[in-house]
Amino acid sequence: MRVLGIETSCDETGVAIYDVERGLLANRLHSQIALHQAYGGVVPELASRDHVAHLLPLVRAALDEARMDAGPIDAIAYTAGPGLIGALLVGASFARGLATAWAKPAIAVHHLEGHLLAPLLEVDPPAFPYLALLVSGGHTMLVDVMALGRYRVLGQSQDDAAGEAFDKTAKLLGLPYPGGAALAALAEQGESGAFRFPRPMLDRPGLDFSFSGLKTAVRVALRDRALTERTRADAARAFEDAVVETLAEKCRRALRETGRRRLIVAGGVGANRRLRERLVEVARDGGASAHFPRPAFCTDNGAMIAVAGALRLATGRASELRVRPTRAHWPLDAPEDEPA
Ligand code: KG4
Ligand code: ZN
């Protein structure tokens, strides 16, 4: 069973082909980062237009990479939401058009389900059930992944997502958008402990997060200081330490409360090296194993949509018509929701 996956929810155009027996056969990505950088954030209209320009060449390139034509493709999976509505519309229209032309089914996939299943693309994939820390530009949540399509949100950010906090703090430090990876690189030069920022919500029980105060704490700490290279690096390090410690502690609690034996990280912030190192320790201390997608599969990509679509197709859970084609908002607890 082979599925072509299409991801266009934000600023990456991703196309991949996944085979249930043989694994990933092709993976193509076009990043729009350079396009949006001048604006300091994603411009939705430009994102939509750029997806239009790149989808067809990427599909051709993926088919070439897999050395096949449309014949052996069994279905086309596409991100139906959540995300930027225009960008989603481009991917959904393209995928459903392709499905009609090729006379194959189209499968609507929840973007976050894609992130949650990304570790299945790696060798030694985790078996269900597992605990997932999903940390991206738009979401920060702890999810109990019980089975395909059965997700229980245990806690989430009450305000900014972890990636959003990284990006906003990076901006304060004069780094270009999206600043997460650049801030992490700057933090490597900094000294731990030169600044100390709060660990939000660690003093309270529960598994929710809050990151907007942390960004403010960085702003206040830097207000009357000359922004030397040293100061910037030390602040980046202290910020990263605070986010990583907060995420790690909530994972520790969640492992204990759920008794899960496997911990995974997903989403763009999951590419962060320090976070990965800390989560390995947290898993080990909690008697669990840690499973990470490679960094390129933490950020948005077509492979995670292809694997989600393939698993849905293989288990008869690919009912396209029950899902609204594009949804800017879509609760993860209801990945097969009825259309409104
Ligand atoms: O999952 P993703 O590609 O897109 C969303 O669905 O949001 O996540 C993007 C986020 C951005 O906020 C970016 O700054 C952050 O992931 N990010 C990182 C790193 N690489 C990407 N944050 C911290 N450290 C990194 N190495
Ligand atoms: Zn994402």
Image (cartoon, rainbow, N blue to C red):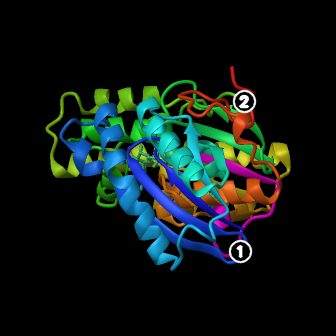
The answer to whether the residue labelled 2 contacts the one labelled 1, judged by CB atoms less than 8 Å apart, is no
Instruction: Say few, some or many: other residues with alpha carbon within 10 Å of mark 2 (under 14 / 14 to 19 / 20 or more).
Output: few
Residue type beneath disc 1: Asp
Q: Is mark 2 within 8 Å of ligand 1?
A: no
Mark 2 residue element: loop
Mark 1 residue element: loop
Q: What x and y, as percent, mark residue 99?
A: 59, 51
Q: Is residue 222 left or right of residue 200?
A: left
The magenta stretch spans residue 282? no
Residue type beneath disc 2: Pro
Q: Against 308, is 224 above or below?
A: above
**Residue at 82% across / 52% down in the picture?**
316
Which label lies toward us, 2 or 1?
Answer: 1
Quarter of the image with the C terminus is: top right
Quarter of the image with the N terminus is: bottom right
**Residue at 47% across / 54% down in the picture?**
299
Which residue position holds label 1? 124
Q: Is residue 330 left or right of residue 199?
A: right
State the separation of the CA atoms marked 2 and 1: 33 Å
**Residue at 21% across / 52% down in the picture?**
230
Using the image as rendered, state which of residue 324 and residue 291 is in the foreground: 324
Is residue 147 at all visible to an observer of this figure?
yes
Q: What x and y, as percent, mark residue 186?
A: 29, 55
- Identify the image quadrant of residue 56: bottom left
Magenta residues (range): 119-134
Which residue position holds label 2? 205
**Residue at 32% across / 58% down in the picture?**
185
- Identify the image quadrant of residue 292: bottom right
Q: What x and y, as percent, mark residue 144?
A: 77, 44
